[in-house]
Image: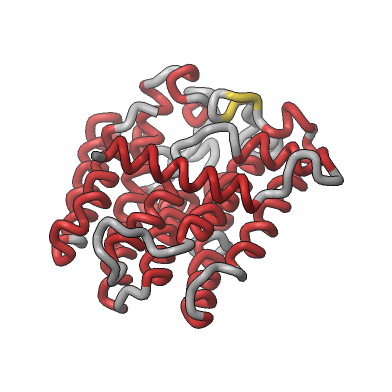
Amino acid sequence: MLRQVLDEGRAAADAALELLLPPAAQHPTSIHQAMRHSVFAGGKRLRPILCMEAGRMTTAQPCASLPAGIERLGAALEMLHTYSLIHDDLPALDNDDLRRGRPTCHKVFGEAVAILAGDALQTQAYEVLAQIQCPSDARVSIIREIAHATGTIDGMIGGQVVDLEAEHKRPDLATLEYIHRSKTAALLTASVVSGGIYSGASGEAIENLRVYGQSIGLAFQIVDDVLDVTQSSEQLGKTAGKDTAAEKATYPALFGVEESLRRADALIVKACAQLDSFGERADTLKELARFLVARKS
């Protein structure tokens, strides 16, 4: 069941991205080729899938139905995620040559075009969000939610800054959690919350989704840190051990592997408990939560 959800969700997200991104032959071709190089490099499409499944769980339609057009919202989230990866891989930040098993954007197209490709994906995402098929008040709420999640206050950019400033230091737990909750969990949270807003979920349902997203987001990054020190580059599709080599703030560095995984498991239990009131409609999101800590890449 979960494999089918992942496969169908990835296919829906990819179809929407193919439709919404400028074609590679569109002038100026270099920037559009760079955008597509990174967007279609593979990846699990977790953010679009979480968004779509949150919309499915909270919609008034039959449980098997996705809200019409929600895949475009998912595609915009994937554009934002990919923009962050392009910039994260740049020499000024993590300086990585490998992403999703392929050379990173700046290695193929140069740093200048890679920077602009990230900028272009962010811009394209908001153009898509401005046109999603939901009531105008919901559209504004979704844009506000996602903009905050990618910004400087408790958002992705702020988390990246604190992560850079914590290098070559031994951070305390509060700093480490701030980095992970902002840099990674914020956009994952926005993905499920925006899916709920799109489907017209109640305020109580939105808050349940928010706690679920925050919990799985932190667990996801904890597991990512563990995989970085336990898996190979070939298994991960990116350079393994870079966080350790750069003396970055990670859970294994602070707690060790076993305790880190125990904390991730506890967060998944908390996340799933938040969805108990939805009954069987929550089964897929609960399975996705458990998948996040069981994955090997």
Whether residue 65 is visible here, answered yes or no, is yes
Comparing 18 with 44, the one in front is 18
Total labels: the figure holds 0
Residue name at image x 39 percent, y 64 percent: 67
Task: Report the residue at 69% width, 47% height from top.
Answer: 118
Horizontally, is 65 left or right of 110 in the view?
left
Q: Position of residue 119 (x, y in %)?
A: 72, 52
Residue 168 drawn above or below residue 47: above
The C terminus - image quarter: top left
Identity of the residue drawn at 73% across and 33% down: 106
Q: Nearer the viewer, residue 134 or 163?
A: 134
Residue 71 lies, in percent from the top left, at 48, 55
**Which quarter of the rendered picture does the N terminus lie within?**
top left
Side of 282 where 154 appears, left or right:
right
Identify whether 165 is placed above or below 238.
below
Residue found 30% across the figure and 54% down from its top: 215
Residue with the most extreme right position: 28
**Depth order, front residue of 109/247:** 109
Q: Is residue 267 visible?
A: no
**Left or right: 81 in relation to 2:** right
Instruction: Give the x, y percent position of residue 270.
Output: 20, 55
Residue 218: % across, % down: 35, 49
In the image shown, does 287 or 19 lie closer to the viewer? 19
Left or right: residue 153 versus residue 53 is: right
